[in-house]
Amino acid sequence: MPGMGHVAFVRSPHAHARIRSIDGSAALARPGVIAVVTGRDLVPHCAPLPIATSSAEGGGDPTATDVGRQHYPLSVDRVRHVGEAVAAVIGSSVEAAADGASDVVVDWEPLPAVVDAVAAMAPGAPQLFDDAPKNIEHTQAIKAGDPDAAFAKAHRVVKQRMLSQRLSGVPMEARAVLAAPDFASGGLVVWSTHQAPHVLRQGLSQALRIPENQIRVIAPEVGGGFGVKFGTYPEDVVVSALARLRRMPLRWIETRVEHMTSTTHGRAQVTDMEAAVDADGRIAGLRMNVIADVGAYPIFTFIPDLTLMMGVGVYRVENIDLRDTCVFTNTTSVAAYRGAGRPEAAYYLERLMDCVAAELGRPPEEIRRKNFIPPESFPYAAPTGQNYDSGEYDKALTRALEVVRYDALRAEQRQRIEQKDRRLLGIGMSCYVEMCGFGPYESALVRVEPSGTVTAMTGTSPHGQGHETTFAQIIADHLGVDFDKVVVRHGDTSVSAMGFGTGGSRSLVVGGSAMLRAADKVQEKARRLAASMLEAAFEDVELNDGRYQVKGVPAKSLSLAKIAERAYAEGLPEGLEPGLEATEYFRPPQLVYPFGAHVAVVEIDRETGRITVRSYVSVDDCGTRISPLLVDGQVHGGIAQGAAQAVLEEVVYSPEGQLITGSLMDYALPRADDLPSFTTDQTVTVSPFNPLGAKGIGEAATIGSTPAVVNAVVDALRPFGVRHLDMPLRPERVWRAMQNGAPAAAKK
Ligand code: MCN
């Protein structure tokens, strides 16, 4: 923008430290540096960050704040993780701002840090907040039936501790924000890479104490999000506050290193699982104890609670004792990342099912089938409090095993072991169910213009999911207009009605249902207009093959364009309002529960421990599919992301809290040659709880794939006595497991 300045942040090099003083004089002496602003300078101009305790990801109230543990967008007095921003430098160029930031001298008083959640709870551990003894942020428990009795009676108790390691979001493009004074409203226009523009507007309004109608947030192009572009980030608030104070447009674009240290991370749980198993392989009781590292600040810390809510997965287990403990550590905050709480649950359960099968010496598919919630039980009131809408779990597993040619693979596996082949074969399966389609509601506006073109506006905010396509399809079907004549607009708070953005695989189920209702309302009005134009009764006009016609009289019909022309013309009959548009909100009566079965086939090189995913079959059930190609795309991306957690990705901190994986040279993202071509298949079990019969698909394959790949690797290593390995399954870890556990028969 003309006259735009650039912002760079001064960030903490310490995991835990007090700020004694900040000296910006050297920076200010540098040509091109316009201002140096510290946390203290900003205090009079903004409230502490609104810390949302829930959001569209969790279905709660996104405006709820936890006033106990606030922090300012530029930290004052103390920092709690490496990368925390303490000052901002405004420069006339990106370079001047960056150089200026490096000139700012902060007098730090380093404090002892703790980076491990278990260690953080131990006596004597450094404390992050005075009101959080033992660094515990919150605990949660779900108990049903009589788990203690089930464990006392069990034929066998199968236990396993597992890790769902910390991950970084790493969207294709990092975060960015540009804020400019809006001289029309006296407020601000803020362009931000955000998954939920209205939610950001609310956050900025609270933080800057500006009325909502003076903030316009625009976020049509996001560059990918994967859940990490949701909350109100410090940088959004600082850049907006400074643009207002300095009365100039200001921009900040996150570097990749900043992304790794300052954008929220995901997962970061360690969990003990225990199953009370009878002689037949039926699971009578389940215990789950999750310790969740929430990092330095409480952002969406309800996510580990979602892990408990999905704690029984696709299985009928009546007696459960599920707990979580959320713990602060001196690390980047952990919040939403694709799947958010549900992949963790599916991973623990599906690994545990394989452990049960191994201990009982039974095939993993048999143990799963014995425990599935049967199709006739739906809607199923799970002991976790979830009301599963519909499901046919065995059907998905049977289909996946058929498509992958399971029996032939098992024969090949045996043969390779007998022949002491250098490449071991592993086959892993996973069956998942997830909760999605979070409310509270979503908005949609459908407007037919006088020429018959259609503009739709949604409160969802796609950033790679393709709502522009799906929603246009829904409108084309329900209005009788060509797909090409529909434009779907989103990502601008001044354009669309209140919305909750895109996350938690909610957009089609909630936003698409709102769109369908708005289209139906417009269709009804179009039929009313057509009735008056064709001199027929309203009840006799139907939409047939794209034309509004009198029933049984195809010659008496009108196109939507003709009707629209009339809707905006003078002289409408009494009782008909001009215009042809409708705004609708859809409030989902409850969540939906997509499910599926995935099978991964891996080869492991005995000499190096290197894993190759040879083939992959997914059978995902998201109810009615509106755009099969987009669904496939979501499944492909999901499998890639879930498989990458299994074998590649991990955020690593040193014991002092320094980020070891601070760039893409250290953080192992999957590349094309790490993945096979996926075979995607489906079953279709509609949901009764929305007019489309749809369930979400945006996260499903991320949930199904991680356990499938890990199960496949452990399956291949079974001859070496391996029962479990923690992710990521790096070649070294796999190689060591073979060296340590190899029984003579399995050695070359
Ligand atoms: N769809 C369909 N039929 C169904 C279900 C979905 O045609 N039965 C279509 C939808 O219309 C939409 C897409 O599939 O075009 C995904 O829809 P949905 O399951 O409603 O999920 P959302 O659109 O709400 O996407 C959110 C989900 C999440 S939570 C993350 S994280 C994520 C993901 O989507 N981040 C992504 N997929 C991503 N894809 C890309 N490219 N980039 C990201 O950052």
Image (spheres, rainbow, N blue to C red):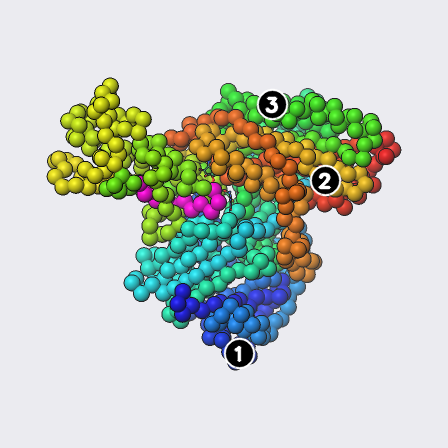
- Residue stretch rendered in magenta on the structure: 454-465
Instruction: Please name the amino acid that badge 3 sits on.
Output: Thr
Side (left or right) of 293 relative to 2: right
Dot 2: what SS? strand
Instruction: Please name the amino acid that badge 2 sits on.
Output: Ile
Spatial distance from mark 1 to mark 2, Cα to Cα? 52 Å
Label 3 vs label 2, nearer the camera: 2
Q: Quadrant of residue 654?
A: bottom right
Residue placed under numbered mark 1 in the picture: 30
Instruction: Tell me where residue 403 appears, x and y as whole percent.
Output: 61, 25
Residue ID at (49%, 70%): 93
Dot 1: what SS? loop
Dot 3: what SS? helix
Label 3 vs label 1, nearer the camera: 1
Residue ID at (52%, 26%): 683
Spatial distance from mark 3 to mark 2, Cα to Cα? 26 Å
Instruction: Please name the amino acid that badge 1 sits on.
Output: Arg
Q: In which quarter of the image is residue 519?
A: top left
Instruction: Tell me where residue 23 appears, x and y as whole percent.
Output: 55, 77
Residue placed under numbered mark 2 in the picture: 611
Task: Please determine whether, in this image, residue 14 is positioned above or below residue 138.
Answer: below
